[in-house]
Image (cartoon, rainbow, N blue to C red):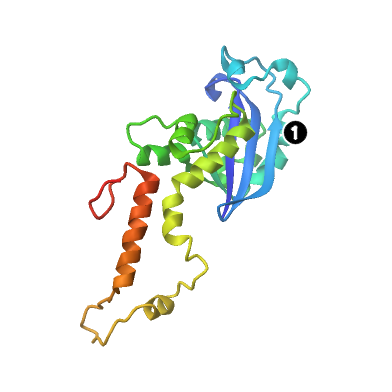
Amino acid sequence: MRQIILDTETTGLEWKKGNRIVEIGCIEMIERRQTGRTFHVYVNPQREFEQGAAEVTGLSLDFLADKPLFKDIADEFVQFIDGAELVIHNAQFDVGFLDYELSLLGPAYGKILDRCTVEDSLAMARQRFPGQRNSLDALCKRLGVDNSGRDLHGALIDADLLAQVYLNLTAGQQEFFGEAADEPTTKAAVAASYDFGETTQAERVRVRISEDELAAHAARLEKLRKKVGGVVFWDGATA
């Protein structure tokens, strides 16, 4: 699977008030591994920052004055993300701004969801950690991601942190299936790995699990409990 970890910085909080994108940062991952390909650009917004917005990013209109307009980088940007799954923290915010910028260029560019699927890591975090702070900084602290170099918000820096946070958020699935990813997964291969015994068409298949398999299963559960923390498992135990 090709995924793009994406973040933007803007002149303010609402595109409906005419705020614009000033920075885009994207990191490509294929099969959960960074490929080294990135897309990073500063954009001249042709408007003032809202109060406080410039301080958050450390950017200024003087710095952005000689940077390209969004229309100048739009084709390269959409080519980079085309067909990928976008992973975005608080996706509604970034997608709203990107759709607004594309709409200013005319209907030919369409919308982000015409080109990509979107995974909102904020929604994932709220499901896993209900009732807790789930900002990017809070998740970095909770999941052991080093964000000590993040003095200011920056699109590429935040995309890199989000990539690490996302891999941690989805590590449970990788724990179960990642080690066996290269093994055959056909029905015949799965069936061959168990002793089903003799059955008739009317009988329910019985899977016979060895003591070694039970011990390995218990060890895996214990490993997951130590790793994720605060989760109620299907066996009733709480990490």
- In the rendered image, the vertical position of residue 192 relative to residue 216, given as above or below: below
Instruction: Specify few, some or many for label 1: CA neighbours under 10 Å numbering under 14, 14-19, or 20 or more.
Output: few
Furthest-right residue in this view: 66
- In the rendered image, the vertical position of residue 212 relative to residue 239, given as above or below: below
Q: Quadrant of the N terminus?
A: bottom right
Furthest-top residue in this view: 51
Viewer-closest of 31 and 194: 194
Viewer-closest of 30 and 140: 140
Percent from the top left, x then y, of residue 229? 35, 43
Q: Quadrant of residue 148?
A: top right
Percent from the top left, x then y, of residue 226? 36, 47
Q: Which residue is label 1 attached to?
A: 72
Disc 1 marks which amino acid? Asp
Percent from the top left, x then y, of residue 235? 24, 55
> Element under label 1?
helix
Residue 76 visible? yes
Percent from the top left, x then y, of residue 101? 62, 31
What residue lies at 28% left-to-right and 75% top-to-bottom? 207
Q: Quadrant of residue 61?
A: top right
What residue lies at 44% left-to-right and 36% top-to-bottom? 122
- In the rendered image, the vertical position of residue 125 relative to residue 197, given as above or below: above
Residue 103 visible? no
- In the rendered image, the vertical position of residue 173 relative to residue 12, given as above or below: below
Viewer-closest of 131 and 194: 194
Q: Is residue 146 left or right of residue 35?
A: left
Viewer-closest of 146 and 182: 146
| Figure label count | 1
Q: Is residue 133 left or right of residue 43?
A: left
